[in-house]
Every structure is written in C-alpha cells, then in structure tokens.
Image (cartoon, rainbow, N blue to C red):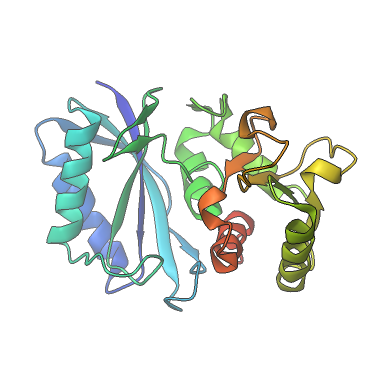
Amino acid sequence: MPDCYIALGGNQGNVRETFDRALQRLDAHPDIVVGKLSQWIETTPVGSQTEAIFLNGAAQLSVELSPEALLTELQTIETELGRVREVRWGARTLDLDLLLFNQLILENNKLTIPHPACWYRRFVLDPLVEIAADVIHPVKQTTIGKLQQRLLQRPFVFSLAGLPQDEALALIQELQTRFPAVEFSRWESNEQHADPSLVAWFGEENTTTAFESLPLLPRLDASEMRRNTEQIVWLLQSALDFR
C-alpha cells in the first residue's frame, strides 16, 4: 500500500475533536489505514482573513486508492465536518491537504503532488517532520527534515529573481519594512549568495534569468504573485512562522 502524508489544519470550533473525527472517518475506509500522527501544534494565521489561532498536524496514511480518489475522500470529509470554501486564507473548520503520495510527481487540473507549498510552509513542515523527517521530497530531492532546517537558518535570505531592477528594488524596500530581520537581495545583481533560504522567481518576460537556472532547493515560482505584494507577504509569513 502506498505511503501518503496529509496535513490537517483548522481554527473554528473544537478543532481537536474535528481532527479526531476526520481521522476516524479515514481509518474506517476499507482502502485507508491511518498510521503515524504528529502532535497538534498551534500556529499563527497567515494572511489577513482571520485572527484565530490555527491547530495544525500531519498524518501518515497507507492507501489502496489513486491520488485522485484519495483527494475526493479528503474533500468529502472536509465538507461533512463543516468546511465551507469561500475565502482563501480564511477561517475554516478543517483542511485536509494531500502532501505526498509515495515518490509520485503529478500535476493535472485537479491535483498537484507533492503539494506545491509543503516544502516551505512551517505550519506544514513542523508537524510533518515529526513523522517523516527522513522521507525524500521527490521534487526537491532532499529530506523533509532538511527542508525544515533550511528555514530555521538565520539570517533568513529572500532573493528576488525575474524582475526588472527598479521593480525588484521597490519591492525589496516595501518588504524590508514588514520583515526587518530578513535579508533581501535581487538575484540578478547579487554577489551569488551561496545558499539563500528562498529564491522567488517572478517571471518577467524580458528577464535574463530562467526559472530552471535557479538553484533547485530554494527556487519558488512566484510569478502569479508579481502584482500582489500581500501574497508575497503571506508567503514569507508562512516560511518564517511567527509563533
């Protein structure tokens, strides 16, 4: 049976009870066995849509389902336990996100595996590392434990790639006021930071830097965030963890 890892999250109602009910529901499925569980940890909400503290955790599942069928089951349980999909980054009773499905790499109009943000979000990695520290992330080709440790290094270095110089410098100036402890740089003009924590690629049409030319471990395609500074702020919040 394939080993899968899911993330659990929620900040509305009795979240611990909701987690228990979700896991019982999964374990009752004839093609799912719930294995290792992390501790439940409190995390500061990311974004501006809710101020209520979240509870987050991770679980290992052994399944005899396709990734798509497992996703359907997770979404069905979310709905049964009160999840309403209205606002991104908003309050919710339950999130069940499929993070890893063995070493499968998959992208279609319904599902991306591994979960595209699981490798840099602390509220995902901190519980996941408790039960999957030695599991290899199939895209980043390093362990979950090492991915988490990279984000703990200080100073946290955030480099911007794929932007014109003026736009990059203006964005850095704005972000610096929000994150004074973070070291910001423009990838095209820096002195080649040996190992930035994250390199966000914004995909400007005339850039001389291709996404594929960036180092594998820290590179992040942030092209959809180019005109939305708040989304970049939320990205950094999720990577830094403000507990």
x 86%, y 37%: residue: 192
x 42%, y 77%: residue: 50
The answer to whether 199 is drawn above or below residue 52 in the figure is above
Q: Residue furthest right?
A: 191
Q: Residue furthest bottom?
A: 51
Specify whether 217 is left or right of 44: right
Q: Quadrant of residue 102?
A: top left
**Relative image position of residue 196 (x, y in whole percent):** 76, 42
Specify whether 66 is left or right of 180: left
In this view, the residue in front, 11 or 106, is: 106
Specify whether 100 is left or right of 129: left
Q: Quadrant of residue 32?
A: top left
Can see residue 155? no
**Relative image position of residue 187 (x, y in whole percent):** 78, 44
**Quarter of the image where the C terminus is located:** bottom right
**Quarter of the image where the N terminus is located:** top left
The answer to whether 229 is drawn above or below residue 76 in the figure is below
